[in-house]
Amino acid sequence: MPNYTLHINGTARKVSADADTPLLWILRDEFNLVGTKFGCGIAQCGACTVHIDGVATRSCQMQVSILDDVKITTIEGLSTDGKHPVQEAWKEIDVPQCGYCQAGQIMTASAFLSENKNPSEEEIREAMHGNICRCASYNRIEKAVKVAANKMS
């Protein structure tokens, strides 16, 4: 198997894996970074969202072989103390119900807000529409994104 060096949460990590192994499984199985969840496996639900060079990306479809020279951030690396403004807003609004989708939701929201500091309600909906929440907490998610935007401005 080929060897790869991945830059995850500010640390270079070495792994041996088949070239087509999805990043999701490298994170979970090789590095025990289990905050990134398996949802659908076809990049449709958003549970596996991480940042690749700051862009929200579905890790279930990213092959390890194309991840040289990129910075990967997982929910564990978003904030060392859980104090990122999006995480704070999630707690303040009490967004999670079952919690399964929340890491992906938070990663999507934080990437979006790094690009758009003052989003409209419509822009928030558009940015978050690809993340599925089985509990239908969409109104609270939208409210928390707005609260986080205010915290970040």
Image (cartoon, rainbow, N blue to C red):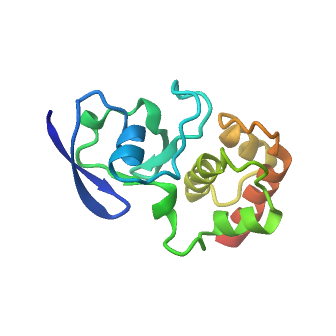
- Between 58 and 101, the residue placed more toward the observer is 101
User: What's the residue at 62%, 32% (across, down)?
Assistant: 45
Q: Quadrant of the C terminus?
A: bottom right
- Left of 145 or right of it: where is 70? left
Residue at position x 78%, y 42% from top?
A: 122
Query: Can you say which quadrant of the picture contains the N terminus?
Result: top left
Horizontally, is 145 left or right of 38 in the view? right
- Residue 144 sits above or below residue 68 on the image: below
Q: Quadrant of residue 23?
A: top left
Residue 123 or residue 9, whichever sits in front: 9
Say if residue 153 shows up in the picture. Answer: no
Q: Quadrant of residue 144?
A: bottom right
> Left of 5 or right of it: where is 97?
right
Total number of numbered labels? 0
The image position of residue 3, as x and y in percent, is 15, 42
Residue at 37% x, 33% y is 22
Image x and y of residue 17, in percent: 23, 36
Residues 153 and 86: in front is: 86
146, above or below 24, in the image: below
Instruction: Give the residue at the far right of this rendering.
Output: 139
| Quarter of image, res 16 | top left
Q: x, y (%) of residue 32?
A: 40, 53
Measuring 55% from the left and 52% from the top, which residue is drawn there?
Answer: 111
Pinpoint residue 2: horizontal percent, then vertical percent: 14, 35
Q: In this orientation, does residue 1 appear? A: yes
Name the residue furthest top: 42
